[in-house]
Amino acid sequence: MLISEVTRFEDVIPSGAIRLGFGCGGLYGGRDRRQSLRLLETAIDSGITYFDTARMYGFGVAESLLGEIASHNRHRMIIATKVGILPASNNVPLRIAARGFNLLHKVIPSSNRYLPVPAASQLRFHAFSRPALCRSFDKSLQELRTDYIDVLLLHECSAEDVDDPQVLEFLLGLKQQGKVRAFGIATGIEQTLRIMPFHASLTSIVQIPSSILDTNIRRLPLRRNGLTVVHSCLARNVRSLVFQLSADNALATKWHVMTQVDPRDETGIAQLLLAHALEANPLGIVLFSTSKLANLKSNVKAAIDPVIKPAQIEGLNAFCGTILHSFLKQQH
């Protein structure tokens, strides 16, 4: 299970394992803590091995939740976390105040000039200085209750961020100490394409958003080695698609004919989009995130025992090319 050198898909996911990864961005503490822990336990028991988290997720508590599960399941887990974005303060009154300021700014945009959101309540991006990297990584180890990280990713990094030689030195140092098995980048497609030609040692693992709206994975250069992780294949797409199909009978009919999926069936649509993402990234990992046990089980079942046939994916691609892309883009 441990990663020693990541140059191929098989270096991360054992043969026959599920190619789904669980995204921990929706894990929260407080009243939701028990539900979050149950989700993680169910994911492991369902066969998921890859867990993606970050310092900022869940207002800074997602790593702690994952660590509670890892304390007795570490041998069954591949943990990917990130450095580069520091979480906002977890102080409840401060978070409530920040929501109030944000609402005020939406209603009265000019108020942003004289009533800014408190700095402590905002995420801190591009935290790639050596001291910030060290503090962030040490905090992750503490929260995750582990002495090593399988995959460490540079979170929303830019080409300018990774041009600093101290960043690579920091990562290589962690790897030499056995604290990190592999490292890579997790950023947008444009920055990824800027970074890859000049920083091969940083991009053996690449994590990008990719969905039917923006099939970014097709923009990546072909490479014999390396691992690609994609996220956002479901996200807002399912509900937006269901809404649009319910509002247009002619469109819904075309959808049904081309995909053989009931346009009113959110679960079926999610399974189709997930199958599309897995087909588009055949040697990589597809991340999904959910707060519902039923959705988790449905996604895993679809990956293990595919209910979606290749002809349906072809139908979705055809539908995307003629109709879907344009009308869904209007919703974003």
Image (cartoon, grey):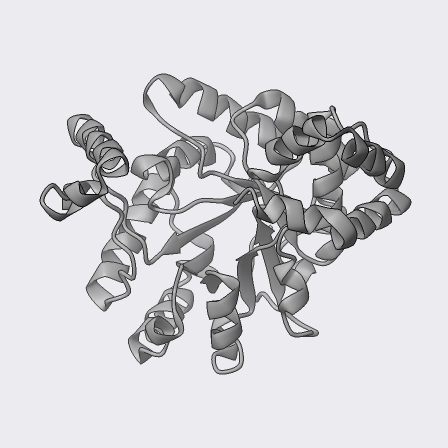
Q: Is residue 171 above or below residue 321?
A: below
Q: Is residue 192 above or below residue 98?
A: below
Return the x and y of residue 169 as percentages of the image width and height. Answer: 34, 75
Say how many tags the image has.
0
Furthest residue toward bottom: 198
Q: Position of residue 129 (x, y in %)?
A: 23, 67
On screen, residue 138 versus residue 284, left or right, reads left
Q: Is residue 99 left or right of residue 268?
A: left
Q: Nearer the viewer, residue 331 or 48?
A: 331
Q: Is residue 115 left or right of residue 107?
A: left
Q: Residue at x 52, y 43 (%)?
A: 51
Residue 305: where, in percent of width, then height? 82, 35
Question: Is 314 placed above or below 169 here?
Answer: above
Q: Residue at x 29, y 56 (%)?
A: 125
Residue 300, can we see it?
Answer: no
Residue 159, compared with residue 33, is above or below; it is: below
Image position, residue 103 (x, y; %): 26, 32
Residue at x 43% of width, y 31% of height: 27
For residue 96, which quarter of the picture? top left
Q: Residue at x 28, y 45 (%)?
A: 87
Q: For residue 292, say whether it is visible.
A: yes
Q: Quadrant of residue 263?
A: top right
Q: Is residue 324 left or right of residue 74?
A: right
Residue at far left of view:
114
